[in-house]
Image: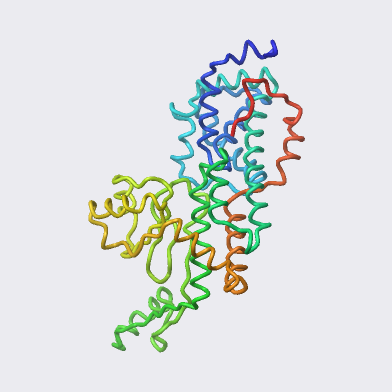
Amino acid sequence: MNKKYDEFMPTKNLSKSALDLIIRKSRVHLYKPIQIAEILLHHRTEKGWDLNDLQSYRNISKRWRDEVSMLLVGRRSTSSQKYQDNVFEANAMPPELLAQLGVINKKNKGLVEAYIYKALEARLSSVRDVENYIKKSTADSFSLKELVAIFQTTPGLRRSIDKMYEILVYALFSTIVRALRAQITLEIGNKDEEILKDFERFIKMVLGVDSKQTKLILPAALYRVGVTNAADRGLDIWANFGPAIQVKHLTLTPELVEDIADNLTADHIVIVCLDSEREAIETLLKQVGWSDRIQGIITINDLDDWYKLCLSKKYRATLGSKLLADVEREFDAEFPSSKEIEPFMFKRGYDKIVLPPDWQVQI
């Protein structure tokens, strides 16, 4: 190693190990690492910052992070304040370890900052590879299992594979439901004119009908709960025709089933899971007395079969093109593919910083 790094970067550096763990656990947006980088930047370039004084930067650093994340990944963190503050806990990056990084970073002119943003750059490069695969795919070339395999084999994307599953499920279900032209009907069964008159404003504002027109027909539709949600539990997709849809790619434990049950009020639930998990899930649902609420269990092989059918010559003109367009749209909404990272690295001077052997980026 270059001698100028020997004093400040011992091989077993606890602060770097903590930083690496945070980076590995982060989704592609790297919100927490970005927050750490921005704290280190202000500590390096401005006087008066004491990294051991957590309260001096706990809240303002969120604004610093959001400004950069909006520029580089197009969105800001929407996680709870408690989850965001976890970055400073003892098992993450407590002030004493952050202060160690601050010494290294300041004496090496932004090296830790560069390390973090080069990790982000590597993540974004992985996202662009997937984006290119999706955008270039045709009905003949697209493969659900091949796309999933990219996430499974790319270290920087593994933490976000649950979101890719959600996208694939949502795009497929929405495409088929639209093609079926499924409809739902809302009708007020109580014809009592008095109650219809007394609650006329409620009926109009909440139910979308009125006392004269007491029946409403709507197209069936599905909705994703939201993008970039940190928690892998609860509701992923909901439908205006009844069922809630939970997409699982991890082992479903009794604790997680109960947690999901506590957070879902839907009477009909559809679970999407790995084929190897189906039998275990069915057994587990019986154990917790939840079987009656399950409308169906769909496996990845089921999804693959339906994708192939939509993309077959029989349906590609009516279903296939719309399905691929939905996958692309949802992927763009979920995953960043920043064009700003390169000029950002140049402006900050990070492109000129050569990382020593112990600080090579691992995504």
The location of residue 214, given as percent across then percent down, is: 39, 85
Q: Is residue 130 above or below residue 140?
A: above
Q: Residue 282: which quarter of the image?
A: bottom left
Which quadrant is home to the C terminus? top right
Q: Is residue 331 left or right of residue 93?
A: right
Q: Is residue 285 left or right of residue 53?
A: left
How many numbered discs? 0
Q: Residue 319: which quarter of the image?
A: bottom right
Q: Relative to the observer, which residue lies in front, 175 or 187?
A: 175
Q: Relative to the observer, which residue lies in front, 313 or 322?
A: 313
Which quadrant is home to the N terminus? top right
Q: Is residue 133 left or right of residue 22?
A: right
Residue at x 51% of width, y 51% of height:
163
Residue at x 52% of width, y 21% of height:
97
Q: Is residue 40 above or below residue 141?
A: above
Q: How is the image coloured?
A: rainbow
Residue at x 40% of width, y 80% of height:
185
The location of residue 110, given as percent across then percent down, is: 68, 25
The location of residue 43, given as percent across then percent down, is: 63, 25
The location of residue 298, given as percent across then percent down, is: 40, 60
Q: Is residue 280 above or below residue 363?
A: below
